[in-house]
């Protein structure tokens, strides 16, 4: 028995020595490299005119990081570096473009965007404004609430039938919209009316259903040059041409 106790004590001592040695010299771990923040700057211009493109969205692909260009088309955005990063420039009125950078350090990426077709809005004073088609909407103003907008018109035809053509079905709006008495479309009083030329070649007199409730009926969109949203009261619009 004494011999067995000595063996057990020896084994315990060895185990304690091994544990102490392990605790004193833990396995080495390789620290993860700190993320590298890369600053990307640049300018977005119109490929046709060379002018700056304001209010373009600049985003890092596959992330939620996004900024907008200023009035001079300039931007600054930060991305996690150390690997290939995609940067996209996009705005209504232009074809989006994506470029890739190794993102190993601060860099410059400029974009030259190809413009797409625009709608023209001519007011009764003769001023013509070019509007990005993708941003063009029909809208009406609700006092103290703001605008309600849609890609489709909310029209009533002479027989009282409702019509909701998409902007893509319309070739031209001919105004200015004027108040008319049309009981089949509005029993509350006058309703605004104008001419619509459709792309299928037909022309119809339409009544702006939203004006029956006394709302101002507009068209709106992003002004192509400045990138700012503009609103046009159809009572002051002579013609809208949609491509």
Image (spheres, rainbow, N blue to C red):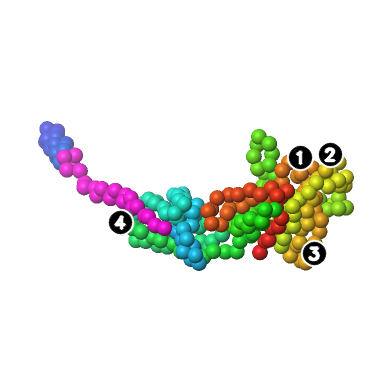
Residue 84 on the magenta span? no
| Up/down of 224 relative to 142, above or below | below
**Where residue 2 appears, x then y in whole percent?**
12, 32
Q: Are marks 4 and 3 in contact (CB under 8 Å)?
A: no
Residue that carries the numbered disc 2 in the rendered image? 188
Tell me the SS state at disc 4: loop
Highlighted magenta segment, given as a residue range = 22-43
Q: Earlier in the sequence, mark 1 or mark 2?
A: 2
Q: Are marks 4 and 2 in contact (CB under 8 Å)?
A: no
Tell me the SS state at disc 1: loop
Residue that carries the numbered disc 3 in the rendered image? 202
**Where residue 190 appears, x then y in whole percent?**
83, 43
Residue that carries the numbered disc 1 in the rendered image? 214
**Where residue 113 appears, x then y in whole percent?**
49, 63
Q: Nearer the viewer, residue 4 or 85?
A: 85
Q: Residue at x 33, y 53 (%)?
A: 38
Tell me the SS state at disc 2: loop
Q: Residue at x 68, y 61 (%)?
A: 241
Q: Earlier in the sequence, mark 4 or mark 3?
A: 4
Cα distance in 3D space between marks 3 and 2: 29 Å
Q: Quarter holding the C terminus?
A: bottom right
Tell me the SS state at disc 3: loop
Which of the two marks, 4 or 3, is nearer to us in this view?
3
Task: Determine crowd level at label 2: few under 14, some 14-19, many 20+ residues with C-alpha closer than 10 A.
Answer: few
Cα distance in 3D space between marks 4 and 2: 66 Å
Q: Are marks 1 and 2 in contact (CB under 8 Å)?
A: yes
Q: Earlier in the sequence, mark 3 or mark 2?
A: 2
Tag of residue 105: 4
């Amino acid at each position: 028995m004494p011999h067995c106790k000595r063996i057990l004590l020896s084994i315990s001592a060895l185990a304690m020595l091994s544990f102490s040695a392990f605790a004193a010299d833990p396995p080495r771990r390789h620290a993860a490299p700190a993320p590298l923040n890369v600053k990307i700057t640049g300018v977005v211009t119109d490929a046709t005119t060379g002018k700056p493109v304001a209010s373009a969205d600049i985003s890092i692909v596959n992330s939620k990081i996004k900024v907008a260009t200023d009035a001079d088309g300039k931007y600054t955005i930060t991305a996690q570096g150390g690997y290939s990063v995609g940067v996209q420039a996009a705005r209504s009125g232009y074809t989006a473009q994506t470029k890739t950078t190794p993102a190993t350090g601060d860099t410059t990426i400029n974009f030259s965007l190809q413009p797409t077709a625009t709608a023209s809005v001519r007011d009764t004073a003769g001023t013509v404004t070019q509007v990005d088609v993708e941003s063009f909407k029909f809208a009406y103003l609700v006092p103290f609430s703001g605008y309600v907008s849609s890609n489709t018109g909310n029209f009533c035809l002479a027989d009282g039938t409702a019509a909701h053509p998409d902007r893509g079905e319309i070739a031209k709006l001919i105004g200015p919209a004027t108040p008319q008495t049309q009981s089949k479309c509005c029993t509350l009083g006058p309703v605004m009316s104008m001419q619509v030329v459709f792309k299928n070649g037909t022309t119809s007199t339409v009544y702006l259903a939203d004006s029956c409730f006394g709302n101002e009926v507009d068209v709106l969109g992003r002004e192509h040059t400045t990138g700012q949203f503009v609103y046009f009261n159809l009572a002051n619009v002579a013609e809208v041409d949609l491509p």
